Each structure stands twice: as structure tokens, then as C-alpha cells.
Image (spheres, grey):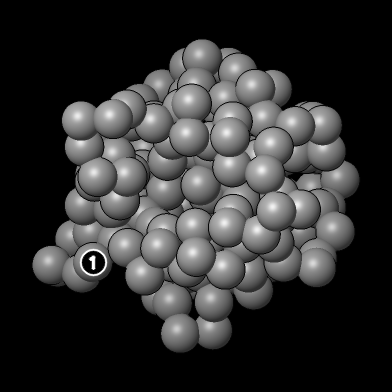
Amino acid sequence: MGGIDPAQLKWRVVAPTLAALPAGLAGDAAVNLLTGTALAESGGAFLAQLGGGPALGLWQMEPATHDDIWRSFLSDARFGEIAARVRRMSCADLPRVQQLVGNLRYGCAMARLAYYRAPDVLPDAGDAAGMSALHKRVYNTARGAADPIITIAAFRRAIAA
């Protein structure tokens, strides 16, 4: 499968995006987790879910999840600084949910927030199996199609990139 080179995705999109968010949202573990999530979800190649599903962008976020992050998390005044920084990553001429497709910074930031609002601690930066399990539990969920054994390979690629 083709797609974005994992090292370029990691170092030119994910790492700078997370560095632009408030402290506590970046770091090696988060960079590897978000790079691995894009690889596990879309192979770093697909901008819309195969088979006609609703998920969008490299991180394959569903519009309902996107909207819930804004409604139930970013609308809370305690997270105003995070919301302000994510808003600066978006552009005014498209609805935010549509930006999951073409705005890599925005899609990455929203995927990071899907993990951040969960109570789980991030695995160590080199723990591919732990990241795959976290991805399944928090991001893909029990209803999702991801197999946490199979997606370990995606997280290994992310760590190695």
C-alpha cells in the first residue's frame, strides 16, 4: 500500500502539531501513538473510510466523535487554552469536521484529544503492544474493526520512523 511516508508523517506533521498544543499533550509517546494511529486506521493513505463508513482523514475520526469532542470537552472553560490552539489549526472557510480530511494538523490534534480526554495513561514511547491496546480500547473501541494484535505492526512502524 502507498501513502504518506511514516517518518515524514511523524516528524513533519505529528510532532510539530503536538508541540503546538499545551504542555502535556506532546512528547515521544504521544508522537508515536498518533503516528501509529494514522497507520493503523488508514494505512496513512485513505482520507475516507473504505466501504462508505463515516470516518474521515488519516486518523479516521467519525464526525460524531469530532463533534462530541467540541461539545463535551473543548467547550469546557477548563480546556480553553487547548480549544484556542486547536481553533488556530483550523481554517475559517470550511466546517471543522470537513477539515479532518485535508487539514493534517487539525486531524492530528483532534485525534490526540480523543486520547487525552480518556483517563488512560500513555504507554512508554517504545511500547508498540501497549499503544495498540490503548488504540483499540480508547480510539477504535470494542465496536471498531481493529485487531490489537494485528495493529501492533503499525505502532512498531511508527516507533521506528
Q: Residue furthest left?
A: 52
Q: Secondary structure at mark 1?
A: loop
| Number of other residues with Cα within 10 Å of mark 1, as a class: few under 14, some 14 to 19, many 20 or more | few
Position of residue 64 measured from the top left corner of the image (x, y, whole percent): 36, 70
Picture quarter containing residue 161?
Answer: top right
Q: How many marks?
A: 1
Residue corresponding to mark 1: 54
User: Please, what is the three-letter code of the amino acid marked with disc 1?
Assistant: Pro
* Residue 85 vs residue 58, the one in the foreground: 85
Residue 15 visible? The answer is no
Q: Measuring 36% from the left and 55% from the top, which residue is drawn there?
A: 60
Residue 36's spot in the image, x, y percent? 56, 44
| Residue at x 47%, y 52% (from the top left corner) | 40
In the displayed orientation, state which residue is furthest to the front.
77
Q: On screen, 14 above or below 123?
A: above
In-image side of 109 versus 134 (left or right): left
